[in-house]
Image (spheres, helix red, strand yellow):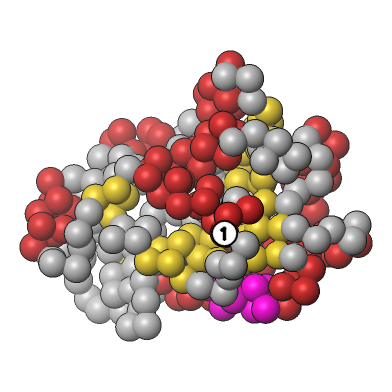
Amino acid sequence: MTRHTALVTGANHGIGAATASTLARSGCGVLCTYLRIDDPVDPGTPQGYRDRRTQDAGPIVAQIQAAGGRAVAVEADLSDPDTPARLFDLAEEQLGPVDILVNNATGGSVPDTFAAAQDDRLGRSLQPVTAATWARHFRVDAMAAALLISEFARRHIARDADWGRIVGLTSGGDLGFPEEVSYGAAKAAQTNYTMSAALELAPHGVTANMVYPPVTDTGWVTDAVRQEVARRPELIHIATPAEVADVIAYLASDAAHLITANVITLR
């Protein structure tokens, strides 16, 4: 995959960082975008997880470069509609045209609810659904993903390219995402955009899929989370970011050319 360039959002920690590293090891140049977020202190969220969200992607890029790979880090606010074009310009200048897009970034850890509960079953503080909680998730998980796909498609078609990969990450499901209402709804919108892209861009050699990870220990998994996973038989594994990244990298490979317009649920 040495001829390919990937744009990975939310690449300063967790699944995004693992995906950037995995793609770089396969030979891709990787633009690692991130936004440092200082979440409020919450009794259900480990401090270590909050700390990871405030770091930049410099350490990830340094690791990739030390191993002989190509990577560039850039802090970018995906809620700004002008950001996608700027990111693609930067990638083209420093790494080459983007032909792998990984929409991994999320709008932040803001669990919201329609009910009156003050804490969820994992001990995290809940907020009522408001315009602010809606906007924080939809501007990144839905709007930014749509604009990044649109920018990808415009440039891909303009250069008459015939190979491309789009991978997004989702959560929630057909029955919504109780206690993370706006996050689940925004991810459902991203899924819809990605499925549309799979069909519309297929004639141009692009595949587009969504990955639904299992509970993934990016630093937020507490004993309460582990107990919840053990209690529910459908939650089979607690994955590592690297395990999820391996699936994303496979979907970005030549071997996955027949896999498109799918939501791939990992357990």
How many discs mark residues in the rendered view? 1
Q: Main secondary structure of the magenta part?
A: helix
**Camera-nearest residue between 206 and 177:** 206
Label 1: which residue? 256
Looking at the rendering, which quadrant does residue 126 occupy? bottom left
Q: Is residue 194 magenta?
A: yes
Tell me the quarter of the image containing the N terminus.
top right
From what the image shows, is residue 146 above or below residue 123?
A: below
Q: Which residues are magenta?
A: 191-199
Label 1 secondary element? helix
From the top left corner, tell me how far across and down residue 113 is, in percent: 31, 73
Classify residue 164 as left or right of residue 15.
right
Toward the top, the furthest residue is 66
Tell me the quarter of the image containing the C terminus.
bottom left
From what the image shows, is residue 81 above or below residue 33?
A: below
Q: Amino acid at mark 1?
A: Ala
